[in-house]
Structures are given as C-alpha cells and as structure tokens.
Amino acid sequence: MEKHQAVGCAVIGYGGMGGWHCDKIRKDIAGAELIGTYDIKPDRCAAAEKKGIHAFASREELLADERIQLVTVATPNDVHKEIVVAALEAGKNVICEKPCALSSADLEEMIAASRKAGKLLTAHQNRRWDEDYLTAKKIIDENMLGRVYNIESRVQGDRGVPGDWRNRKAQGGGMLLDWGVHLLDQVLMLKEKQRLVSVYAHLTFITSDEVDDGFRTMLTFDDGTTAYVEVVTSNFVKLPRWYILGLNGSAVIEDWGLRGKIVKVSDWENRDAVPVQAGAGLTKTMAPRTDDTIKKYKLPKVKSDWGEFYKNVVAALNGEAQALITMDQVRRSTKLMEAIFESARTNTVVSPE
C-alpha cells in the first residue's frame, strides 16, 4: 500500500468531546497528526496547552494553517453550521459532531458548502461502533430470529439533563438532539433499505422546562417492521437496552455490558400449553412454554474498534475508501428528528419520507 503523509488534524471546541477527539487522534489513529485546537473559552485553551496540545489564538488562525487538512467541530450544536461552513470555505475537510445541524435547511447549506469546496463533510456517529448495537445488527442481519417485526431501543438514566448547553434550547439542547440522534441513526441503519412511512412521538419535560429530557417514538417501515425508541433521564428502574422480536424467537440485550440472551421456538406445532393461574383467573394463552419447545442461546460475539471511524476518514481523504457516514444518512436522521418534534407538537402521526 502506498505510504501517505499524515493527515493534519485540528479540533474546534475543547470541551468534553473536543478533548476526547484530541486524545484519540494523538494516541490511537495511525496516519493522523494533531496540529492543535481552539476554544472560545481561554480556560479551555489553557487546559489544552497543559496537556501539550497547541491552542490557536483564534478560529481564523486555525483555519489559515496550511498544515491542517481535517477539522473536527466539537462545539455546542447551535454553532455547528457557522463553523463547518467556514472550515469548508477555508479548504478544510470536516468532521462534525452530532447532530450536524438543528434543521434540514441548515444541513443542506452545509452540504452545499461541501460540494462547492470539493471537500469531505462527514458526521461523528460514533455509536455505530457500540457493541450492543453491533450485536443487535448481527442478530438481525444474520436472520437469527427469522423475520424481525419489532425492535425496541432504549437508553435510560436517572440524573435529568446535564446543566450545560444540553439544558438550553437556544444551543440545541435536549435529549432528542443529544441521545436521540444516536439511537435513531442506529435504527435507520438497521432498516437502511426500507422506507419510513410513519412516526408518532411524545416528548417529556419531567426535569426540565426548557428542553425535552426524554422522548418516546414509534416508527413504522414499509415492510411492516415497527421500532420503538425511547430516551429517559428520570428512570430509576431500567428496561433492556434492546428487545428484538422475530417470527422464530426473541432477543434481549440488557445493557452496554452485553448481558442478555436469545430464545428461539423449536416446535411451533407442539400443543403443550395447559392452563395456569394468572392473578384472579386462568390462562392458556399466556402459559409459559415447556423446555422441549424452546431453545436458549448466548448472544453472538462481536468485536468493535472505534478507531475505525477516523481510520476510514483518513482512508477517504487518501482516496482509498468511501466515507462510512454519508450526508444522505445524516439527512435522513435529521428529517426523522424534525418529524418527531412535529408529531409531539401536534400529537399526530407524521410521514417523514
């Protein structure tokens, strides 16, 4: 393979995620070199310098540096478009933290700037490398449950919305834009070839009056599959991270630690049910199956390397690969989030595609 010069990288925004990007580029990504960072807060620039990372004096100085080919934008959501467009116009390739934009209209401006500049624009949808998601994807892609007809995906916490920009509407806060963008992207990738025909959603404001602290949405695809996606920040008893139903079995993934199991029916025709006591009455319909008609399996093993994200971007810049995260995919998830906001506002079913 031809040896390429290291791609010069810079990160705009040295908060939690910006610092994380800097550390990853410095330590884990072959073929990439961190040139520096910039943050509007002097104390954050000082924190970067303390870790041995060059802090530029301004965004303009960073964008004028010819050593930099790739800029990662890791700022609050409301300034993504402004910074991304400026970076593209300065001739830089860009990775934008999610969500890329607060509206489809803003996203289209960013895409247009990318095309005009002839530069790469991609999004940091890092949770495509989460092992719980990859386990669910493997179960579905390899038809382990037969035809899957329902997918449930949840993330649940009990601390409310963090007291930073995530709790401010003007800065693009709220859980739909913070966590929903991940879970919805995952479900859309599981159903990449199917059209999304309807969305019904509800936002919650239990711990915050200004932004949603959670949401619930039901998605229906044109092959009949339904997906229930939920984010909660005031839940003290957790439900499974994933719950997947197929014609021949069910799968549960309890958490990020990958506790869970697959249960498959081995004999649909066995009429083994006998009535059981259920509360104040008897039921045959809900009687548990006997062990000889079902089989239990461990979850499949998956391996994940988050570093593949940056490695793919570097390969794309060197002409050796296509970007894994495309603007068409980002456009689809952005429109879905808009549909969720609209459905919750009007209490109606919305057709996003």
Image (cartoon, rainbow, N blue to C red):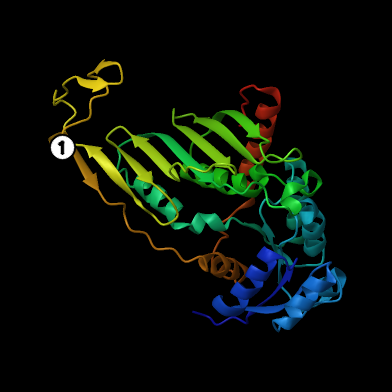
Specify whether residue 116 is in view: no
Give left or right: position of 200 versus 14.
left
**Along the horizontal axis of the image, is 154 left or right of 147?**
right
Nearer to us in this view, 319 or 226: 226
Q: Which residue is mark 1?
A: 291
Q: From the viewer's perspective, is residue 64 above or below residue 172?
A: below
Identify the residue at image location x=31%, y=52%: 299
SS of the residue at dot 1?
helix
- On the rendered structure, is 302 left or right of 43? left
Q: Position of residue 193 (x, y in %)?
A: 48, 40
Looking at the image, which residue sits at the far top? 281
Depicted 98 relative to depicted 188: above or below: below
Residue 249, position in %: x, y? Answer: 28, 37
Pick the front one: 160 or 190: 160
Front position in the image: 180 or 109? 180
Q: Is residue 223 above or below residue 313?
A: above
Frontmost residue, 281 versus 202: 281
Q: Where is residue 336 drawn, in percent x and y?
A: 62, 37
Q: How many numbered marks does the figure carry?
A: 1
Occupied quadrant, residue 28: bottom right
For disc 1, the neighbor class at 10 Å (few under 14, some 14 to 19, many from 20) is few
In the visual, does 6 lie left or right of 261? right
Which residue is found at the position 55% from the left and 70% from the top? 311
Look at the image and tell me whether residue 100 can be seen.
Answer: yes
Give the image quarter of residue 205: top right
| Residue name at image x 52 percent, y 47 percent | 186
Residue 312: image location, x then y, percent: 55, 66
Q: Quadrant of the C terminus?
A: top right
Q: Which residue corresponds to the image point at 39% horizontal and 52% vertical from the top-left? A: 135
What kind of residue is marked 1? Asp
